[in-house]
Image (cartoon, helix red, strand yellow):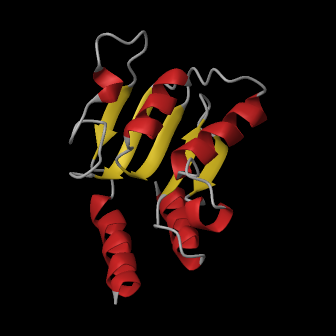
Amino acid sequence: MREALDLAASAAAWGDVPIGAVVVGPEGDVVGRGANVRERDHDPAGHAEVVALRAAALARGEWRLTGCTLVVTLEPCTMCAGAAVLARVDRVVFAAYDDKAGAVGSLWDVVRDRRLNHRPEVLGGVLAEESTALLDDFFTHHRS
């Protein structure tokens, strides 16, 4: 999570919402990294989770990320939760909860939907205070 927080800070430096993500492989090595790039790249799908999942798939040479863990600084939205399910990650670990758009338990619960063929484990609240502080600082300065 510390590496994801560092990536989040880099996103803020180029004007994106500070969200970072890493994909940890089965052996505990980081196989994908991502930060929000929506503003920088003018990409509506440029969420940190999608960037990290794409990097991990490329590094592993396959789209199925079985055995991997997605670690992200903010509870994934519906798009990112869906991407985690479709990538077949084993678990999703996130820092801050997102009451406005979270799709891993807060507003929706995409990853635990029994109608889907894959349901990763979930662990939320890991270093939530640090992530929340980054987000609060960004929006305080961004809105002023």
Kindly identify the residue that appears in the image at 37 percent across and 46 percent down. 94
> Quadrant of the rendered structure where residue 119 is?
top left
Whether residue 94 is situated above or below residue 84 in the rendered picture: below
The reply to whether residue 88 is visible in this rendering is no
Q: Position of residue 96 (x, y in %)?
A: 30, 55
Kindly identify the residue that appears in the image at 30 percent across and 66 percent down. 132
> Relative to the observer, which residue lies in front, 84 or 60?
84
Quadrant where the C terminus sits is bottom left
* Image position of 81 (left or right of 49): left
Q: Position of residue 97 (x, y in %)?
A: 26, 51
Kindly identify the residue that appears in the image at 35 percent across and 26 percent down. 111
Whether residue 141 is situated above or below residue 76 in the rendered picture: below
> Relative to the observer, which residue lies in front, 105 or 38?
38
Q: Position of residue 76 (x, y in %)?
A: 39, 44
The reply to whether residue 47 is visible in this rendering is yes
Kindly identify the residue that appears in the image at 31 percent across and 38 percent down. 103
> Relative to the observer, which residue lies in front, 28 or 55?
55
Whether residue 96 is situated above or below residue 28 in the rendered picture: below
Q: Position of residue 131 (x, y in %)?
A: 36, 64
* Image position of 27 (left or right of 4): right
Whether residue 93 is situated above or below residue 135 in the rendered picture: above
- Which residue occupies the extreme bottom position in the image? 144
